[in-house]
Amino acid sequence: MAEASRWHLGGTPKHKLRYREDVEIRTTLQELLLYSIFLINLCILTFGMVNPHMYYLNKVMSSLFLDTSVAGEERTNFKSIRSITDFWKFMEGPLLDGLYWDSWYNNENLYDLKNSSRIYYENILLGLPRVRQLKVRNGTCKVHSFFRSLMDECYDKYTSKNEDTADFGLKQHTEWKYSSPRTNSPWHWGFVGVYQNGGYIFTLSKSKSETLNKFINLRMNSWITRGTRVIFIDFSVYNANVNLFCIIRLVAEFPATGGILTSWQFYSVKLLRYVSFYDYFIASCEIIFCIFIIVFTIQEIKKLKEFKFAYFKSIWNWLELLLLVVIKNTEKYSDFYFLAYWHIYYNNIIAITIFFAWIKIFKFISFNKTMSQLSSTLSRCIKDIIGFAIMFFIIFFAYAQLGFLVFGSQVDDFSTFQNAIFTQFRIVLGDFNFAGIQQANRILGPIYFITFIFFVFFVLLNMFLAIINDTYSEVKADYSIGRRPDFQLGKMIKKSYNNALEKLKLKKPETDEDKKRMENKDLAEKARREGFDEKEIQSAEQMKKWKERLEKKYYSTEIQDDYQTVTQQEFRDLFLYAVELEKELHYVSLKLNRVMRKVSALQY
């Protein structure tokens, strides 16, 4: 009997189970500490890549080239270009004035410019700006037989198959001859097409007057034709004061419908990474980051070998794998766009990496009751949420298609199916243009809007909140009756903190009696908060004392004999313990009935 009492579940001694729990808790605590160091290093690394001057440099450059109006026409700037005439006015006016800064504001030459321009006197124009055009061939689309007598030429939208590669116009210089694209250059995603590199290219001169004559010559010889589909203006500047490059691309698209659509890209990047002492500190963080990646990779490989296919059943293992996977001639055009493109791509990968790195913190939240309740709620209601999501998106996409078909030709927010989807999300958040919908269709517009708000906002969203609320109530009820995870990691952290204070002599060491007294006091305070009276608390304390005394006697590993006699006093203690245990079970049953009544009241 005594031998059997010394063994716990599955024939494992109880003291060994406690030892295993302590080892697991210490291992988890070490992993949390190591991961915290990794996360701090990653944060320093990522924030070191961002310079607050990037925003201001982009703002200054965009204001100069986008908002500056044509002389004598205050409403004509790059953003407002709608015709070929407006485009040439911009090229010969604000663009030239913005690119060529030959002297100080009082016409004094204060810098040794070395035949280069300094925009706003601080930003060096690197190399020469480049202008590039892409065209499509005639006959890439078919004209209906009814209109062939009126129009015999047809230019379709831009695709690589429709692209015109033949020389045209004067056929003398590069701007009239086609240049093949480079294979490693990124394509440009515009409003109405995706454009490759190459095309009809020319670079500007270092002289403002020569560039102006070049523009006039192109305009007079019809460089822009009906087949023109896009024109790119690319140039780069460098600001030594903040060690930043600004790569600028101005885009004018000529859709097959006519008119011009303008867009732009301003990339401020730090291509010269190691200049100051802080940059070298960031370099050391990058080395530490690489070491962490190597260590984590080795750990995951070991886990994969140990658990094999069971490894992929844990969401945290998938997240860890995801974290491992993501992480000089001045007489020519200096192509920094390629470097800037991949630098921005690298920044985006790092941003996603730091996001998932923070999400992984949830793996170590078992020591916090509130966070544990949150994770338990989400994991328990995931099936209900998936079922709700299917129903929600069926209705949501049905309304999106309705809005696209009814309002797509007149309202910009519904011009494409993708725009209609995002517009409906904005409607749910309270951002909508009801006047535009009503003007597009006076009957279907209000019907669409009112029914969408009713079904999606008032019905479906409230159903979603009800699912979360009911599940959270169930989880909280389970926690109140003791069905909760054991927050041993929090106790270990608190214990380590107290031990550190004791070693530093900032706190008196606690005896076992003090610890028991404090533990009993905390339990009593918690019981009072949960509604137990003093009689119940005293009874529970008495039963706990009996339990500790019995465990000390019958679960002790120092017992060597297989059989021991039970005295009359011990039998009496066991009987009283069983009686008190029956009372306690009765109190637990009453408490459970009270909780279930509260849950039933919440449901109705």
Image: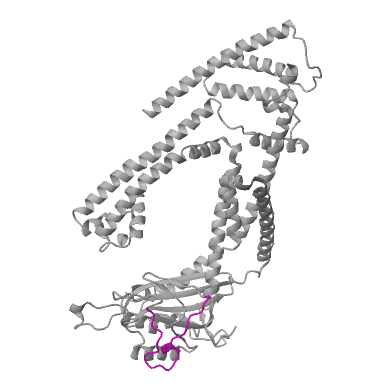
Is residue 593 shown above or below 70?
A: above
Q: Does residue 520 appear to the left or right of 170 in the view shown? A: right
**Res. 139 image quadrant:** bottom left
Q: Position of residue 577 (x, y in %)?
A: 64, 12
In the rendered image, residue 200 lying in the magenta stretch gets the answer no
> Does residue 391 lie above or below 537 as drawn?
below
**Figure colour scheme:** one colour
- Residue ranking furthest to the front: 309
User: Where does residue 23 sit, x and y in percent of width and height?
Assistant: 72, 37
Q: Nearer the viewer, residue 391 or 219?
A: 391
Nearest the viewer among 96 and 386 is: 386
Q: Is residue 122 something that shows in the picture?
A: no
The residue at 54%/57% (across/down) is 352
Instruction: Please state the total of marks drawn on the protein image.
Output: 0
Q: Nearer the viewer, residue 548 or 112?
A: 548
Q: Main secondary structure of the magenta part?
A: loop
Residue visible at 67% across and 59% down in the picture? 290
Q: If the image is split into quadrants, where does the C terminus sit?
A: top left
Instruction: Say left or right for 340 vs 439.
Output: right
Q: Is residue 114 visible?
A: yes
Question: Residue 95 falls in which quadrant of the image?
Answer: bottom left
Residue drawn at the location 25% of the way across and 56% of the way down: 437
57 in relation to 23, above or below: below
Q: State whether residue 265 is above or below residue 420.
A: below
Query: Quadrant location of the N terminus?
Result: top right
Q: Residue at x 32, y 42 (%)?
A: 458
Q: Position of residue 491 (x, y in %)?
A: 66, 34
Left or right of 579? Residue 87 is: left
Q: Is residue 168 magenta?
A: yes
Magenta range is 162-184
